[in-house]
Image (spheres, rainbow, N blue to C red):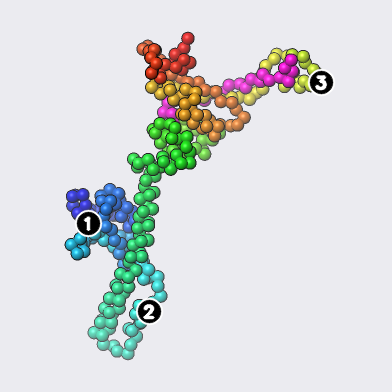
Amino acid sequence: MLNGEGSFTDRKYNQLQTDFRVEAVAANILKYYDTQANIYIKRIGLNDRAYLKDIKGITTSSYDLDEENIIIETYREGIYDYLPEGIFHPPSLGASSTNIDSVVREIRKQKAVEDDARKFFQPFELEFFYTHVSALLKESEFDAENKTNALLEFACELWPVLRKIDQKSAKILVHILPFIHEVRGNKNWIEKFLSAFLNVPVNISFLPNTVEEQDDKEGITALGNARLGVTFIPTGKHMDGDRNWMINIGTIPYDEIHRYIPGSSFRELLRELYDFFTPVSVKIFENFITEKKDESFVLSIDNELNRLGYSTFL
C-alpha cells in the first residue's frame, strides 16, 4: 500500500483522452506517492499497441512475503523482440505431423521458452527503464512549479553573482533568463523585464547626449587643430543628436532602498544587466523614485531606510 491511501492500482492513471508513458507514471509514483516504491516494467510486445495505450495495466504483488512491488505492463518491444528468430528455440511448426494436439503442445512449449527468454533480459530492460525515470525526475527538479532550489543552484555555478543577492530576486531572474535574448535592444521589453525582475514599475525616457570634451583644453584655439562642429563650436558644450537612456525605477518601498545603494551586490547585478541588453552607444542614467510617507524619516544607526539622496533630501 502507498502512504496508507489504498492501492495504487485502484487509481485512474489514464483517461480517455490521455496516453501517458510508462516512465512518466513511474516518475510520478516515486515523486508524489512513495519514493521507495519498487517498480517493475514488463514489456509484452507491440501486437495490440496500434489501438491501445502505452500502459496495459498496473498490478501489485509481493514476492516471498517481501515488500509490495508495482508491476506495470506496457505494449513495448523488449530486447527479445529485436533479436533474430530461432536463437532460443528452433522452428518446429513445419514438421510433418498434423496432429492438432501436438501443434498446441509445441506452441505452448515455445511460448514458455519465450517467457523465460523475456525474463532473462528483464534486468537489462529495467536498467534502461530506471535511467529514463531518473532523467525525468532530474528534469522535474528544474520545473518552475518545483519548490526546490535545484535550478537556482545550477545557475549560481554559472553566474556566481546570484549568490550575493537575495534568493527571491535570484529566482525571478533565473526564470526570466530564457527570454532575455528577446529583451536585448528592445526598449519596451527592457521595461517589462526590469518591472518583472524588480517588482516595481520601470519606465525608460530619453536624454540628449551632451558633448563637453574639447581638444583645446588650455583655452587657446588653434584653427589648424580645431574641427568645426566637433571641438570648435561658438556656444561651448553642445548636443550631438544622440540619445541616452534615463531608467526611472519606482515607486520603491522603503524596506528595499538598501538594495539600490551604490556598492550593494544587487546594484552591481543591475549594472551588469544594463550592460547586457542596452545599446553600447548610449549612456545609462538611473532615477530612483521612493515612496512618500510622512513618518519615513527616522534617525537611527541601524536603520538602512534613511539614505540621503534616496529617501531623504535636503
Q: Residue at x 32, y 83 (%)?
A: 93
State the residue lying farthest toward the right: 224
For the view shown, which residue lies furthest in the front direction?
301
Residue 166, visible in the rendered structure: yes
Answer with mark 3 or mark 2, whichever residue precedes in sequence: 2
What segment carries the magenta color?
Answer: 197-218
Which sits in the foreground, 265 or 139?
A: 265
Residue 86: mark? 2
- In the picture, the quarter occupied by the N terminus is bottom left
Assess whether residue 200 is covered by the magenta stretch: yes
> On the image, numbered disc 3 is attached to which residue?
224
> What is the x, y in percent for residue 190?
50, 31
* Three-letter residue code for mark 2: Gly
The residue depicted at 29 percent of the width and 88 percent of the height is: 98
Indicate whether 272 appears above or below 217: below
Alpha carbon separation for disc pair 1 and 3: 93 Å
Mark 1 or 3, nearer chain start: 1
Is residue 83 found inside the magenta-colored segment of the image? no
Number of numbered labels in the structure image: 3
SS at badge 3: loop
Residue 66, percent from left and from top: 20, 60
Q: Which mark is residue 9?
A: 1
